[in-house]
Amino acid sequence: MQTLTADILPQTIRQRPADSYKGTYGHIVLIGGNQNFGGAIIMASTAAVYAGAGLVTTLTDPSNQGSLHARLPEAMFADYHDSDLLTSLVQGANVVVIGPGLGTDATALGVLKRVFGLVTAQQTLVVDGSALTMVATHDLNFPDVPLVLTPHQMEWQRVSGVKIADQTEAANRTVVDQLKATVVLKSHHTQIYTANATYENPLGTPAQATGGMGDTLAGMVGGFIAQFKPTDQAVLAAVYSHSAIAEELAQTQYVVLPHQIATALPTFMKQHAAK
Ligand SMILES: NC(=O)C1=CN([C@@H]2O[C@H](COP(=O)(O)OP(=O)(O)OC[C@H]3O[C@@H](n4cnc5c(N)ncnc54)[C@H](O)[C@@H]3O)[C@@H](O)[C@H]2O)[C@@H](O)CC1
Ligand SMILES: Nc1ncnc2c1ncn2[C@@H]1O[C@H](COP(=O)(O)OP(=O)(O)O)[C@@H](O)[C@H]1O
Ligand SMILES: [Mg+2]
């Protein structure tokens, strides 16, 4: 297991070329937020926008439209019940993030299956939260596309079948290799399993233990993948940045609010981009 260091930041976060426009920085679609969990997809979308994704579209329950636009006018909105719109938006994306606040009812399952059927090998799919739980509950196969999973330990138990107490590096590695995914296994010491290596994030604080912290990470992961290559490096840099910002804020705060991490991102990325 390798320990992540701050070196990952300038290796990954590039200076923006002058000759660029929003399309250069990716189109990301985020799908989630039912009538009860709208905050989750708003936090994820906020993180994607503040990470610098060029175009961000949020597919969610229509009850979230007003709050999404009030909090985040940079994001476009679409109703995830509209399957024609969902199809065209997913087909037009470079990166798709599905799961934050999606819930696990019949609507959520229908959306998940549809998205799994639409994504292609030219896109990257980030699967988080409720989407992971439904994969396990309904015994779904992940699509055969570039895949990043961001489970917490219980979601990983559901998906992998490995109980939390038995989640050793060797046991996790066996399942990761079968899934052919990059897995961010979140805990107070998050581990990242790529095809070729395993990393531990040395940063993080219990000030992060609050609802929405993982939703924010999922949006950051999507936003970084939309801009930075290779994908595994983008994932590592997103995980490291998320905790590094939290540690900075926790020097003076008892709890770090997830949206504060997103707000701090543009300054953090400027400080740590390649010179
Ligand atoms: N404001 C919002 O709209 C929020 C929406 N959320 C959404 O709610 C849905 C359900 O997610 P939850 O994770 O809350 O519920 P889950 O039921 O999926 O997972 C929580 C369970 O996992 C256990 N667990 C064990 N190890 C854990 C670890 N290291 N980290 C976290 N939990 C661990 C907990 O004890 C608990 O029993 C997701 O779609 C999520 O995105 C949550 O993110 C909370 C905030
Ligand atoms: N004690 C802790 N120390 C460090 N990081 C933590 C701690 N508790 C939670 N986190 C981080 O917060 C995030 C929680 O993710 P998750 O459980 O999916 O939250 P949610 O679904 O509510 O957004 C993960 O990135 C995890 O690593
Ligand atoms: Mg979560």
Image (cartoon, rainbow, N blue to C red):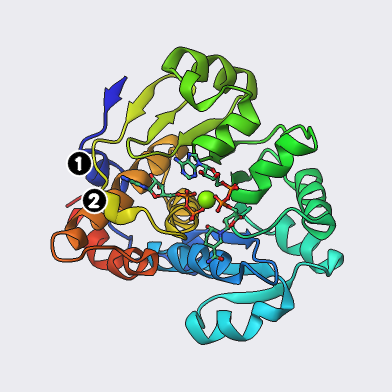
Residue type at tag 1: Ala
Measured from the top left, where is residue 232 in percent x and y? 44, 35
Q: Nearer the viewer, residue 89 or 134?
A: 134
Q: Position of residue 157 (x, y in %)?
A: 58, 30
What residue is shown with label 2? 244
Where's the N terminus, which quadrant?
Answer: top left
Residue at the extreme front of the image, as rendered: 165
Mark 1 secondary-structure assignment: loop
- How many other residues sit within 10 Å of disc 1, few (<14), some (14-19) or many (≥20)? few
Q: Is residue 14 visible?
A: no
Residue that appears at 21% across and 53% down: 247
Element carrying mark 2: helix
Disc 2 versus disc 1: distance between alpha carbons? 9 Å
Q: Quadrant of residue 35?
A: bottom right
Residue 186: percent from the left, percent from the top? 43, 39
Q: Residue at x 44, y 19 (%)?
A: 196
Q: Quadrant of residue 187?
A: top left
Instruction: Say which residue appears at 51% left-offset and 20% top-offset.
Output: 172
122 or 142: nearer the viewer: 142
In screen coordinates, is 51 left or right of 154?
left
Q: How many numbered marks does the figure carry? A: 2
Q: Is residue 148 left or right of residue 236?
A: right
Q: Is residue 262 left or right of residue 134?
A: left
**CB at disc 2 and ligand 2 closer than 8 Å:** no
Q: On the picture, is 138 further left or further right than 42?
A: right
Report the residue marked by disc 1: 6
Q: Disc 2 residue type? A: Ala
Foreground: disc 2 or disc 1: 2
Sequence order check: which comes first, mark 2 or mark 1? 1
In the rendered image of this protein, does residue 204 appear above or below residue 220? Answer: above
Look at the numbered discs 2 and 1 and tell me whether their residues touch, using CB distance below 8 Å: yes
